[in-house]
Image (cartoon, grey):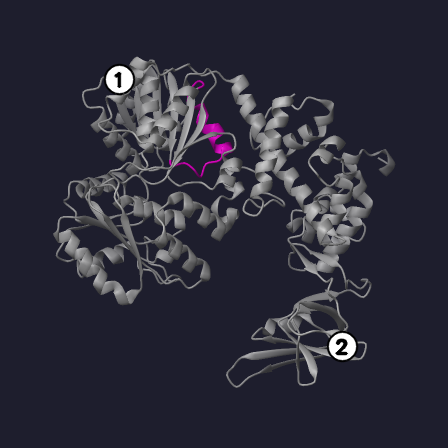
Amino acid sequence: MDASEKTPAQSLATPVQYLKGVGPARVDLLERLGLRTAADVLFLFPRDYQDLTDHRPIENLEEGKLQTVCGIVEDIELRGTRTGKTILGVLVRQDGGFLRALWFNQPFMRDKFSLGQRVMLSGKPKYEGLMWRMNHPRVEPLAEEDEDPAGRILPVYPLTEGLHQWEMRRNVRQALDDYGPLIEEAFPAEYLAQHDLCPMARALPQIHFPGDRQSLTRARRRFVYQELFVLQLALALRRRQQDDARRAPELAASAKIDARIRRRFPFELTAGQEQAIAEIAADMARSKPMNRLLQGDVGSGKTIVALYAMLLSVAHGHQAVLMAPTEVLARQHAQTFEKLLIGSEVRRGLLTGGLPARQRAALLEKISDGELDLVLGTQAIIQQDVSFAKLGLVVIDEQHKFGVRQRARLKYAGPDPHYLVMTATPIPRSVTMTLFGDLDVSTLRDTPPRRQKVNTYLAGDDKRERWWEFFRKKLREGRQGFVVTPLVDESEQLDVASVQERFEALANGELEAFRVGLIHGRMPPQEKDTVMDAFRRGEHQVLVCTSVVEVGVDVPNATLMTIESGERFGLAQLHQLRGRISRGRYPGFCCVFAEAQTEAARKRLEAFAKSTDGFKLAERDFALRGPGDLFGTQQHGLPPFRIADLLRDQDLLVEARQDAMHLIAADPGLAEPEHARLRRQTLVRYGKALDLGDVG
């Protein structure tokens, strides 16, 4: 087909090897970066920018300011010092003036230079010994045919070995010239004006080669907004499809049913629990399936709210199922429910992967025949051979790491059930609006008055003896405690004692006078249950463990916790662990031994010691680690962001979400002609990931 006969979409799908200046020799390098078509090159957004607007002749340099110099490499000297270190000196000439660039202890930099090479150096110069010098400047090799980049803002692209920045810039500029005009504008002109968005025809060149900082800011805002807006459209469309296509049983909480359920709770509910129950009951009374996230801090009483919802389902003759991530937590829930349902006619069962075949078969038959009302268990619940007679409610506990793609699979455990997901790891607001954007959210911020304060300490090895003396004192007073270590096996790479080693050292050392148990994730389920039951009964005074106790372990008498190698745990995980010792009538004491060798680890540990508010810690963790580390979109089945940053772009996310909701309310299927491009873009980007059908 002649180029003139191609549609814009066909032209944009041109393989990269046919881009001018690329050729077959460079194709593999570009494909390593995921660049296969002309459109891929156009939307390879820079990861950073080099601001060369303050470009100076060498004779006009000023000390202490970030400035840029272009010149020719005149001399290269790599020498060693008496202490075994290295110094690399590169002399650069510019119109008769000279500047020396120095790198200390970076001998690999020598390979970046050759005599006569054109280079650009950016750094803060200092005048010494009758010559200007820059220590560790940023270096940019310049091709002979490159025009002088001084005075401009240059894009910095992700690269792979064998590919240079100047080559990538040339490829992008060529793609912009040849294919940039073919990119269609997704937004109607009126929408662009109303929302102060830079048109595509201007935004695309400016995001790559901005004329100034203001143009770059406007171009970036356009693309971030569009990326977040399209995601929010997809989530809103998914929610609409669920509401339109699925029908759930109407399970209203009448005054009689409400009173019967509340009689099971031997305590007053908190204001937060009352609000969450009201929101859940309102959802379950409708014929549209409930899709709700219940989040609360450690010990905020989510299980009671979930039990209310499950009993509401049972009261209407429907089954309810609760799935937990571990057998330890599933059994913990089963024990809690047994205490609250003593004397009840509610039939209940526990389904886990460790059940003997005959027992499992009998349980499955009862579930499919409707002889069980409440079913608790692990992911064994969603296996293909599990069939519910009349499922009304699905509760997923501690599955906050599942995103919309996984939830789509979990929901089909029964015919149109209501759906509630719970997490004790508070989720930053911007993450909630993206990875959980298809759910309504209920939040428990207050904690039951019976919860106790936990005193938290950070300590080095010099405080060990004092801590163990205090630990033993509390054990003699009748308390119990945990010792948490991060690894199961010995590791040559990490100087961290394995849980087995730690158990043996403590049982024969600091805690030899006490009854010490051992539990970790690799133990057989039955063995784990035996150890946990013994700890609950007080037969073990101390439990040496891994983070298998992070969630769900409820032993009110356990008020002591020692965390070894605390720098190896995330902030949310540390907070979850600490939550195990706030469940009784005695105050808790948690001591973290750590060697914070990085600034990030130090800040994380200090934040943990200063606050017991899980919501504040979640936001702090988000700020410290970033969204990619906390909630990578790929693990949730969503394509990764190309330019948006959930930490930096929170305000724009709120704006995009509100705008997307308004648009879907006005045009539910994006069927209006002016929304055709947005509709197509949404389906192409998220149709498969979110199981979106044809929304027209």
As drawn, is 509 to the left or to the right of 52?
left
Secondary structure state at the residue bearing disc 2: helix
Q: Indicate the quadrant where residue 133 lies.
A: bottom right
The one nearer the camera, 43 or 575, is 575
The one nearer the camera, 120 or 296, is 296
Q: Are marks 1 and 2 in contact (CB under 8 Å)?
A: no
- Please, what is the three-letter code of the amino acid marked with disc 1? Arg
Q: How many marks?
A: 2
| Distance Cα–Cα, label 1 vs label 2 | 87 Å
Residue 677 image point, x, y percent: 71, 30
Residue 370 in sight: no
As drawn, is 333 to the left or to the right of 650?
left
Q: Callout 2 environment at 10 Å: few (<14), some (14 to 19), or many (20+)?
A: some
Q: Quadrant of the C terminus?
A: top right
State the mark number for residue 285: none
As drawn, is 469 to the left or to the right of 444?
left
Secondary structure state at the residue bearing disc 1: helix
Q: Is residue 672 above or below residue 256?
A: below
Taking the spot 76% from the left edge, 77% from the top edge, the residue there is 59
Residue 166 image point, x, y percent: 74, 59
Q: Quadrant of the N terminus?
A: top right
Residue 488 image point, x, y percent: 32, 52
Q: Callout 1 environment at 10 Å: few (<14), some (14 to 19), or many (20+)?
A: some
**The stretch drawn in magenta includes residue 402:** yes
Q: Which residue is mark 1?
A: 260
Q: Which residue is mark 2?
A: 59
Which span is picked out in magenta? 398-416
Q: Is residue 516 above or below residue 382?
A: below
- Please, what is the three-letter code of the amino acid marked with disc 2? Glu
Taking the spot 77% from the left edge, 62% from the top edge, the residue there is 149
Residue 278 image point, x, y percent: 38, 23
Taking the spot 29% from the left edge, 23% from the top edge, the residue there is 363
